[in-house]
Image: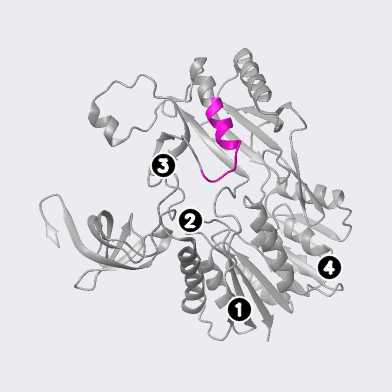
Amino acid sequence: MRKNKKNIVIENIKMHGAGAKGVAIGRTEEGKTVLVTGAVPGDTVNARVKKSKSKYFEAEAIEIVEKSPHRVEPRCVHFGVCGGCKWQNLSYEKQLYIKQDEVYNHIKRIGGFEDFETLPILGSSEQYFYRNKMEFSFSNARWLTQYEISSEENFGNRNALGFHIPGMWSKILDLKECWLQEDPSNYIRLAVNQYAVANGLEFFDVKEQTGFLRTLMLRQNSKGEWMVLFQLFRDQQEDRVKLFDFLLKEFPQIKTLVYCINSKQNDSIYDQHVVTYFGEGFLMEEMDGLQFKIGPKSFFQTNYKQALELYRKTLDFADLKGDEVVYDLYTGTGTIAQYVAKKAKQVIGIESVQEAINAAKEHAKLNGLDNCTFYCGDMKDIFNDEFLANHPKADVLITDPPRDGMHQKVVEQILNLAPEKIVYVSCNSATQARDMALMKDHYRLVKILPVDMFPQTHHVENIALLVKI
């Protein structure tokens, strides 16, 4: 370890694993844990300490002494700056290995389970260009590189359209390319940026809360049809119409173009009125014969192909025979509920967001499913004794909660309900393991299946099957 007044540099530290949020993990000669950004498992690095805690260091790699055999060349020119795709420098095979190992360890260490089957992780068929929805922000305060800052040049045009810099919300990285959404996503974003600059349209100033152009969302379906959503801080009708008409002429793939005027302090559109400028204001998506209407505010899995595999595996785990009553907790827009409805007697979905429930009901009607019923309310409040008394007993329960997992009251009510099988879908295997540990006296964990929905990131989903003892 090298020290001076400003820097502590740990030299020749071997990265032996990966930790939370994709950081690499090593140990000092004294055995203290070091969490290193900019390194991958298998690297030997020199790392500068950024924070010193009693039990570990947080550090950044400043030199790769010996490259890991799992290290690959990142594809994106913005790698390491924008904060996304943090594992572009790690082979996909190693990404899958780490994700599977993380899920398995959470289930064993946090959940305390021993005897269960771990199925091989389900990798994504697409490692790039797999997202069907991307959101970009306009800013008149483009993030400058260290080279630009040190050059002392006067950068007159500081406009940018891209992603927020991690930890610096007011600074936007001006994206030249992005490998997450297939083209014409890049072409549309660049065309909007170039048109706005050429025509003197004001980019948003997040500090002063002024400007015209605020955010841009691009959404596509599996048929290659596109939705464009603009958030404008104020309405400039002539400028707006010219911009929209320009886009529609340049990109015939745009099926619908919508916008909203959002003059509040945050970018959330869920409380905003969205206006349809062109098209129907929504896209249609199909999943194994089911139709879904995707609007500008709709929640829909961003990796379509892998979401379909996730639903198929969830249905496999449920192993329905056709005469079961199924509860679907945290049903969202009812996608899983409707996917399993074709093999169930009745499906009851519960969700806290009214707009999602409205969409679920609309989709069920669209798909001719008369065996689906949906209820709106906070899960811990609506899923109570009275609810269970007024509805048929569930044979199978499917739950897909947010990252925080389920409230303890919800877990207790599931135990009161006592379905024969529970299929627990989770985007956070740590909280999933915590919740399942509360059921250990009543349920046996049969198997788990990790699913990679987001290649090049540390995120991983997991499906677990529990059977009543």
User: In the rendered image of this protein, does residue 97 appear above or below residue 82?
Assistant: below
Quarter of the image that includes the N terminus: bottom left
Q: Earlier in the sequence, mark 3 or mark 2?
A: 3
Q: Nearer the viewer, mark 1 or mark 3?
A: 3
- Mark 1–mark 3 Cα distance, whole angstroms, equals 45 Å
- Mark 4–mark 1 Cα distance, whole angstroms, equals 26 Å
Q: Earlier in the sequence, mark 2 or mark 1?
A: 1
The answer to whether 308 appears left or right of 459 in the picture is right
Residue at label 2?
457
- Mark 3–mark 2 Cα distance, whole angstroms, equals 15 Å
Tell me where residue 45 appears, x and y as whole percent: 25, 60
Residue 277 visible in this rendered orientation of the protein = yes
- Which secondary structure lies at badge 3? loop
- Mark 4–mark 3 Cα distance, whole angstroms, equals 46 Å
User: In the rendered image of this protein, does residue 140 appear above or below residue 271?
Assistant: above
Q: Amino acid at mark 1?
A: Met
Find out whether residue 181 is within the magenta segment: yes
Residue at label 1?
439
Q: Earlier in the sequence, mark 4 or mark 1?
A: 4
